[in-house]
Amino acid sequence: FTDHSPFAPHHELPESAWALSQVFDGFDGPLFYAYDFGDEWIHVIELVERIDRGQRAPKAVLVDGARRGPLEDSGGIAGYAEKLAVLADRQHPGHDGVAEWVRRVAGARLPYDPDFLDIDGVNADLAARFEGKY
């Protein structure tokens, strides 16, 4: 956080101590979130609308998106792009190794499609996580 950030006085609090609703109170964003400092993934989170859905509503729902998220520990933007290129080229000498790595990281569902976003699957994962079943 910068000295001018609304969170500067709280920069030592762990992210688990914050809810997005708290972060966006009095802050009109966008919020930049650094995920996986080694791979340098920066996410932009924008609050579009607040909807009070009551106590029984899911705590988090993915409404829309584009493409699936990059694979864990894929080497940042350049590493992920390289892995996708190798995966797409069956003649590449590293293809089998990358394909095996993808199976371990993404699961056995192949072929791996970076353009497919499984919104229902993401929402099932979010529900399980927030209901304590994750």
Image (spheres, rainbow, N blue to C red):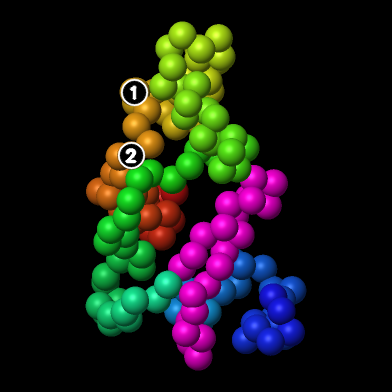
The answer to whether 28 is drawn above or below residue 46 in the figure is: below
Q: How crowded is the residue under tag 2: few (<14 C-alpha within 10 Å), some, or many (20+)?
A: few
Q: Residue 77 location, x and y as percent? A: 56, 43
Q: Quadrant of residue 57?
A: bottom left
Toward the viewer: 34 or 52? 34
Q: Residue 112 location, x and y as percent? A: 37, 28
Residue type, label 1: Pro
- The quarter in which the N terminus is drawn is bottom right
Toward the viewer: 73 or 54? 73
Q: Secondary structure at mark 2?
A: loop
Residue 84 visible, this orientation = yes
Q: Mark 1 vs mark 2: give the one in front.
A: 2
Magenta segment includes 30: yes
Q: Residue 8 location, x and y as percent? A: 70, 82
Q: Which residue is at a point 56% across and 68% down the rendered structure image?
A: 32
Which residue range is magenta in the image? 24-45
Q: Which residue is mark 2?
A: 115
Residue 74 visible, this orientation = no
Q: Horizontal placement of 69 versus 123: left or right?
A: right
Q: Horizontal placement of 93 versus 59: left or right?
A: right
Q: Which residue is at a point 35% across and 45% down the rendered structure image?
A: 67
Q: CA distance from mark 1 to mark 2?
A: 11 Å
Q: Secondary structure at mark 1?
A: loop
Q: Residue 58 location, x and y as percent? A: 30, 66
Q: Which residue is mark 1?
A: 111
Q: How crowded is the residue under tag 1: few (<14 C-alpha within 10 Å), some, or many (20+)?
A: few
The answer to whether 3 is drawn above or below residue 121 in the figure is: below
Q: Quadrant of residue 89?
A: top left
